[in-house]
Image (cartoon, grey):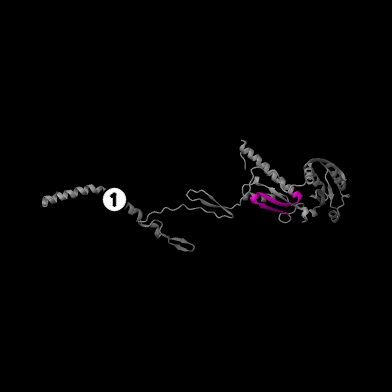
Amino acid sequence: QLKSGSGGRSRWGLALLGLAVLLLPTWDESVQSQEAAGQQFTKPYESSAMEIKTEKGTISPAFTGRTSRTKEVARSPKVPTLEADDHAAEIPSSGKRPAVITRRNQQVKTLSAPPEIEYHPQPSAAAQQILDELSQPVALELNNESLGAVFGLLAQKYQINVVVDALALKKENVAIESAHVTLKVVDVSLRSTLKLILDSANLGFYLDDEVLKITTKSDLQGTQSKRRTTRTYPVGDLISNDDDLESLSAAIQEIVVTDGEIGGWGELNRIAKVPNLGTLIIRQSEAGHHEVLHLLRSLRQTKGEAEKGRFGGGGGGFF
C-alpha cells in the first residue's frame, strides 16, 4: 500500500516505470505490425498517373493495386473459353472450376480396324463375279481382230455377259465389225486389258443390270443414273476427327482421276461426309468407284505398315 507524500509519489513512479518496461516489447511489436500493414495498403499507386495512347484516343487507367485498408479478395481462376462450332466439352483445369473448351469437330465415328465390308450396298452375286474377273490378271494376244470377235472371246473365255449398246455406237458411227484391234498382254488385269482395247475405238464400259455394257465415252459422260452409282464407304479406321474426314474427302477428289470417262467432281459426281457415322457417300461411275476403292485400300495398307513399324520395333510410323 502506497502512502501519500514524497515517499509515496516516488513509489508510484517506480511502479509505473516497471509496468512500462513490461509492456514496452508488446507495444513495439504492435506498432511495427501496424506500420507494415500501412505500407502494404497505403502505398501510392505509381501507375495511376500513366496514360496509354491508342488510335482512338488517350486512356488513363484506373487503380492497378488494392485501395487503402481493403482486404485482399481471392478471385476464382479464369475459365478459358474457345469459340465452338458445334459441341462444348468440359475438361479439368488448374483451378477448381472446369474449363469449357468448344470442340470445332462434330462427333465422329472411328474404328480401330478396317471394316469387314468395304462399301455398301454390296453388288449382287452376278455383278460381283464380273468385278472379280476384271481384277484377275490375263494373258491375251490379238492380231487385227474385230471388236465384235474380241467381245465374243471375252464373254466365252471369262464367263462374262457382255452387251453392246448398239444405239450409242450408232450415234457416233462406230461399227464393231469394222474396228480392229492388235494387242498382246501378259499378267495384266482384265480391267486394264479391256480399257486398252476400248480406248482405241473411243469406247468404254460400265456395269448395268448385272452385265458388262459397252458404250461410247461420250455416253459415259451423260447424266443418266445408270452411268453413276452411289456407294457408302466406312472410313472410320482412317480418321480420328472431323478434320481427318475433310482431308480424306479432299484427297479423294484430288487423286481420283476425273477425265472424260469419269466426269468432273461437282458436276456429274458427288461426295458427301457423314461424321457421326465415319462415312463417305460417293456418287461415281464404275471406273471412279474402282479408283476410290483402290485409294482406300492403299491408305489402309500404308497405315498397317506404319503401325507395324511403330509398335513392332521396326521404326517409327506416321499414324
Residue type of the residue flagged with mark 1? Ser
Q: Quadrant of the C terminus?
A: top right
- Res 289 seen here: yes
Work out whether 139 lies above or below 49. Answer: above
Taking 166 as reference, is 135 above or below it? Answer: above
**Is 279 a magenta residue?**
yes
Query: Which x, y percent locates residue 123?
Result: 76, 47
Answer left or right for 240 relative to 11: right
Dot 1 alpha-carbon crowd within 10 angstroms: few under 14, some 14 to 19, many 20 or more = few
User: Of residues 191 and 275, which is closer to you in this image?
Assistant: 275
Task: Please indicate whether residue 90 sits to the left or right of residue 232 in the image.
Answer: left
Q: Residue beneath label 1, please? A: 30
Picture coordinates of residue 102 (x, y %)?
56, 53
**Bounds of the magenta segment:** 269-288
- On whether residue 316 falls in the magenta region, the answer is no
Label 1 sits on a secondary structure element that is helix
Decide if residue 261 is on the left or right side of residue 250: right
Q: How many marks?
A: 1
* Residue 82 % position (x, y): 54, 54
Q: Residue furthest bottom?
A: 57
